[in-house]
Amino acid sequence: MFGTQFLGLLPLLLMCLTPDSSSGLPSVIKIGGLFDSSQIDNINEKVFLKAIAKVNELDLLEGTKLEGLTRKVPEHQSFPVEKSVCELISAGCVAIFGPRSPVTTPIVESVTDTKEIPHISTRWTNRASRSNCAVNLYPDADVLASVLVDVVRAEGWTHFTIVYYDDDGLYRVKKLLETHGSRGHSVVLRRLPVDGNFRSVFRRIKKSKETFILIDVPTDILHEVLKQAQQIGLMSSEQNFIINNLDMHTVDMEPFKYSGTNISGIRMINTDNPLFRKTIEEWSDGELDITPDTVPLETVLIYDGVFLLAQSLLNVPIEQDPSSVRVARQDDAGAENDGINEDGSPRNEPPEGGGTGDEPGWSSGIPREVSGSTEPVTCENDIAWPHGHSIINDIKISKMPQALSGNLWFDNEGLRSNFQLELIQLTERAMVGTGKWSTKEHVKSYKHQEQEYSLRNMTLRVVIALTPPYGMVKDSFVTLRGNDRYEGYSVDLIQELSQLMGFNYTLEVQVDKKQGNYDNNTKRWNGMIGKILYGEADLAITDLTITGSREEVVDFTMPFMNLGISILYKKPKKKPPELFTFLSPFSRGVWIYVIAAYIGVSVLLFIMARISPYEWNNPYPCIQEPEELENQFSVSNSFWFTIGSLMQQGSEIAPIAVSTRMVAGIWWFFTLIMVSSYTANLAAFLTVTVPDAPFTNVIELEAQSAIRYGAKSDGSTQNFFQYSTNNVYQRMWNYMDTNYADVMPNSNEAGVAKVDKSNDYAFLMESTSIEYETERNCDLTMVGDLLDSKGYGIAMQKNKWFRNKMNYYVLTLQETGKLEAMKTKWWKEKGAGSCGVDQQKDTDSLPLANVGGVFVVLAAGIVFAIFVAFSEMFYNLWKVSQENKSPFKEEFLQEWKFISQCHGSVKPVQKYDSSTASGSVVTGSETGEASPSTRQRRRSNTTSRQNLHIIDTAPFTSAVNMGLFNGGLPARSRNPSRNNLPLVIAKEAENRSLRGGSRNNIHLIGFEPISAATVEEKKGGRNRGKNQKHAATGTTAGRNSIVTDI
């Protein structure tokens, strides 16, 4: 803003920008001003003279003084105005300011244009000036019209009434009508009568229930217009006003501060600027009673215009003022011929045949010059001031960035189109700024601290809907009145906010429960949104969904509850249990893998038992040299062993070899995990009954045709499907639209009742409402996930100053947990709890991925066990081949040939002929062919019986008895009941030992001890033939001893 500091620096700035031309300026330069007798022009005249005095005081023209000449002129009479202009020009004024009247201004422009005297005006006009010597410091009318469009758009008005007074006002709102009319918005024009009685107009506005009003009237009647609007009852918290007047700040708004009405406007002057206020204080002396809040824009523009003219006078050297212009005198012939030479040629060209132009009879359009003659520029002669156009052109290209009215410069057409305005709003304290407008940024709002004045003791009208649990009529035995009649979540929420913000409220019920949609037939919003939009309520609070279309016309607080659309449906009947439910814990794939593992391990155990030599055992432990060995892992036994482990029962079969024990251990680990998993999952399947639901999500609902579905008519859920671009939702909306009357109830209650009474209807509604219903009706349930995400908010009129404050307190309630506590109160506690927790979700079978690791461990263990089994076989074959001096290859081929047969659990013992050097196998009557491992096992079985004592070396007849003492059989004996029993063996054949005798000749005859004398008597004879027998049988002499303790 312009101030005294700038004024002090202006001379230095002008000296830097302009050449030294002080010698060309007259000592005094006169400036004229035309003012009427109105009060504002009296102020303008005084400010005009004060501006001139300030320029002289600062010596901006470097020794040249300005002198102001003023004339009082009538507003509507042309002749006196023309006469005054001529007087000022004759007096030598280099520029003319004024007048204000639109009637006399064209007269002044005509005269000054003819005499080429600069004319500076400071008033609004919509008429493009045809004068080449005129400039207007007032903002361009077309640009101001665009400003009004931007302000209305920023306020969010979509329908409003325009009140104007004259044709100028209609022109100022013309662009606004064109812009909003093209969008289909409702705009009503009302012209005020000229008789001063405006009440009839405001009565019609009140009857129409219009709450958005734009007023464009002259400043001198603005206060009266607002006063009469207040008398009719239009000055309340319901109404919103925009004053289209740049002098709004000069009007006394004190009577309207406390009405709660939202009154906004624009101004060009920032009256709060300290430099501006200091300048105005300098004007305020005993002669001029004025304050910063009462200075009109025209007055400020006159002050800026004087300084702008002074700047241009420095840039354009003036050798002569209009009072003494050097001119040429005309001769009589020239006068008679009126600019035509005697030879008929134009006077502004030299005569034919040459000449310099100084010859008598030639002129350049002005009287022929006579040396030293000067005449004043007057309205009676044709003399024009030669410096007028230069000054006007310099003014149009000059810039004053810190003028009192802001940045002061002009565009290429000489119009002031680049400027800045301030958006203002009336508060209880003062007129405060709420934003700014500029050519580049247009409207830019900002929050002013003064806007947040208190809501304390203000009463807001709050509209609610009787939709449980948000709003309900309270049950009571006594008669309740006012707000005490209602209860619910919304009532508690507005009560909490009123306590935090200090306002009072009155609850009003939306009878039809409509939240609000735009009606294309009536071109109006209905429901709760309509009441907010048209000023019938201040706040709307219920299950009101925040949508884009609603936010175009009203404002919402931040969401106090988040939710989404879901499906409400009758709880399906429970599916009867299946016969083979016990198979459900595992998926089909797992069962297949378990069976495959069972078969595979059984077969593998059978094969590995045949491979491992340690699984071939003597079936008769009493015989030290058996003819055949037996393997306990036959095919049937192998399957029995694995199934016994799988069923957690075990078996009498126990593996002996390391390899088979590894397979058994891995299999036991496998069965441990699988049985544990099966048992745990089986409990869930036996306790959970799966509901037989016809659909589980919205896609399945849309795909079927047996169940109807719909949503609340004219609600946000309907809008979601109606305007969705999703193909599924579009098909659903087509179905709902086709069957609108049947599937689209008018309220959520009707939709819930429809679901409860039928099994073929699903209702789409907000998840919070579904949750409330399912807590109280055990026959209903929510199906599927949320289709979208949205929230409930409190609706209010656009740009309400307390919106941010209310957002803050809603957030405070959320952070402190009060919103959640209120939801628990109305959803879980009040009337809820009758329905227990019902498990509706099916229990999933365990897939292979959950138990796949167990199969991996099983496979890895089997592979390692196979490796161990072959290692055992190879080691045993190598050991046999070393003992018997036989080739390893032959031993391996013979062993593998037997293993490959894959049948039989008994194999014969293979014996070698000791008379041959190579240890060849003895075949025939003894035992037949046997494997090398059998031979090794024979020796090991003979030496393992530590407590068995046998008397078998003496030849006895069949009548002689032998005593056999069994001191204890091996632990793995198949006949543990025989342990520790004394035996007597009688031999029928003479000279045949026990080992070589047939098993058919052995008889158990009881116990008969042999005396020591008899043994000693026979001892000598037995020893003689002993060596021969040992050679044939391969036993050692140490073994053929008589047990003397029998």
Image (cartoon, helix red, strand yellow):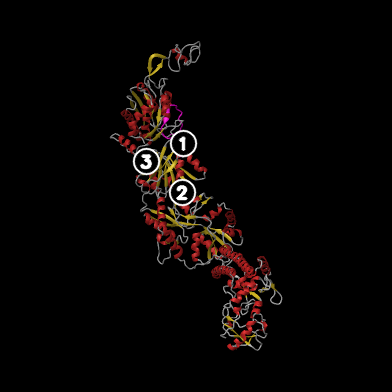
- Mark 3 and mark 2 in contact (Cβ < 8 Å)? no
Residue 24, image x, y percentages: 36, 21
- Crowd band around label 2 with a 10 angstrom C-alpha radius: few (<14), some (14–19), many (20+): few
Q: Are marks 3 and 1 in contact (CB under 8 Å)?
A: no
Q: Quickly name the residue at label 3.
A: 249
Residue that sits furthest to the top in the current view: 353
Q: Tell me which label, 2 or 3, sits earlier in the chain.
A: 2
- Above or below, 1006 relative to 448: below
Quarter of the image with the N terminus is top left
The answer to whether 195 appears left or right of 665 in the picture is: left
Q: Is 942 within the magenta?
A: no
Q: Residue drawn at (48%, 62%), measured in percent from left and top?
A: 772
Closer to viewer: mark 2 or mark 1: 1
In this figure, which residue is indicated by the disc labeled 1?
Answer: 142
- Type of amino acid under label 3: His
Q: Nearer the viewer, residue 823 or 521?
A: 823
Quadrant in the rendering for residue 278:
top left
Say if residue 331 shows up in the picture.
yes
Magenta part of the chain: 125-146
Look at the numbered disc 1 and give the secondary structure of its residue.
Answer: helix
Percent x, y of residue 603: 64, 69
Quadrant where the image shows the C terminus: bottom right
Above or below, comparing residue 930 to residue 706 in the picture: below
Mark closer to the chain start, 3 or 1: 1
User: Which of the pair 593/488 is nearer the observer?
Assistant: 593
Q: CA distance from mark 2 to mark 3?
A: 29 Å
| Residue 691 x %, y % | 56, 66
Q: Is residue 121 above or below residue 729?
A: above
Question: Which residue bears the numbered disc 2?
Answer: 208
Q: Is residue 473 visible?
A: no
